[in-house]
Image (cartoon, rainbow, N blue to C red):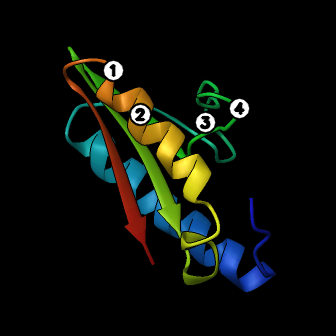
Amino acid sequence: MQKRTKAGQKRHDEGVLRSVKWYEGQGFSVNADLPNYDKPKKIDRYIPDWIAKKGKKEVIGEVETRGTNEKDKDQQQAFKEYADRKPGRTFKKKVI
């Protein structure tokens, strides 16, 4: 996994928080890799930025910056494969 600059990490975390707040506003229960949130479960050997659940729906979310988008392909593939194993589960990636 690629390391981000301090500014890049701040932009990343703000993007994660925006997504988390949107899902919460839609009635999802969300675990997020952010302070004040329960951490999402590991998938393969990676922790996603967030997992949102509502009924039988589950969204695995990942925010990438321009610097990490191409370098984190293995992680993104692990999340996509995990999501594809069960109906109602999806993987969402956002590049900021």
Any mark on residue 18, and which? none
**Other-residue count near label 2 (Cα within 10 Å), few / some / many at <14 / 14–19 / ≥20:** some
Would residue 63 appear left or right of 40 to someone viewing this image?
left
Question: Which mark sits nearer the N-terminus, 3 or 2?
Answer: 3
Asked whether disc 4 touches disc 2, contact meaning CB atoms under 8 Å apart, the reply is no
The percent position of residue 24, horizontal first and vertical second, equals 32, 40
**Other-residue count near label 3 (Cα within 10 Å), few / some / many at <14 / 14–19 / ≥20:** few
Name the image quarter holding residue 67.
bottom right
The residue under the point 60% across, 50% down is 74
Asked whether disc 1 touches disc 2, contact meaning CB atoms under 8 Å apart, the reply is yes
Q: Nearer the viewer, mark 4 or mark 3?
A: 4
The percent position of residue 79, horizontal first and vertical second, equals 47, 39
The Cα atoms of the two marked residues, 4 and 2, are separated by 13 Å
Would residue 1 appear left or right of 64 to someone viewing this image?
right
In this rendering, the count of numbered labels is: 4
List the residue tagged with mark 3: 37
The Cα atoms of the two marked residues, 3 and 2, are separated by 25 Å
List the residue tagged with mark 4: 45
Which quadrant, please, contains the N terminus?
A: bottom right
Q: Secondary structure at mark 4?
A: loop
Asked whether disc 1 touches disc 3, contact meaning CB atoms under 8 Å apart, the reply is no
Question: Which mark sits nearer the N-terminus, 4 or 3?
Answer: 3
The percent position of residue 27, horizontal first and vertical second, equals 23, 32
